[in-house]
Amino acid sequence: MLDKSKRNMEKEAPKVINLGKSIIVPSVQELAKESITNIPLRYVIENGDWPDCPTNPSLPLSIPVIDLQRLLHGDSKNYEELDKLHLACKEWGFFQVVNHGVSTSLLETFMIEVTNFLKLPMEKKKKL
């Protein structure tokens, strides 16, 4: 017989989270193919609208590098790496990962495939 908490979990449907959808805009590559004379407004930043970089002046001006092996091992240094990861996510929104175990050949193949994908016409990209 199932206990009460298990029965409640089975009755609940998974929650659907709507994250919205992307606005499809022409890529810079597509714009470069056209002979446009004005920059589309969505790409214009007025002088006063430049974001501060970085938002925290004590941050370094280089992309954060996270050592995955240090995160995975349970020594005291992993807290330091975890703090770096947290800061990278909070302040930068992205980071570089090292010591991930992915082979150089796979990464090179991936880069070739991404480059080939980016060269495709927009209509083909949308289908993919």
Image (cartoon, rainbow, N blue to C red):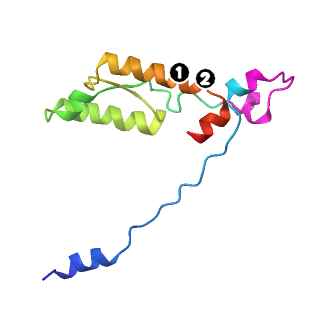
State the mark number for residue 105: none
The reply, left or right, for residue 92 in relation to residue 9 is right
Q: Residue under circle 1?
A: 115
Quadrant into which the C terminus falls: top right
Q: How busy is the neighbourhood of tag 1: few (under 14 within 10 Å), some, or many (20 plus)?
A: few
The residue segment tinted magenta is: 31-50
**Spot occupied by residue 27 in the image (x, y as percentages of width and height):** 67, 30
**Spot occupied by residue 125 in the image (x, y as percentages of width and height):** 60, 35
- Residue type at tag 1: Thr
Residue that protrudes farthest toward the right in the picture = 37
* Residue ID at (13%, 32%): 75
**Spot occupied by residue 126 in the image (x, y as percentages of width and height):** 62, 40
Q: Residue under circle 2?
A: 119
In magenta stretch: residue 39: yes
Camera-side residue: 104 or 55? 104
* Residue ID at (16%, 80%): 2
Q: Which secondary structure lies at badge 2?
A: helix
- How many marks are shown on the rendered structure? 2
- Residue type at tag 2: Lys
**Spot occupied by residue 67 in the image (x, y as percentages of width and height):** 28, 26
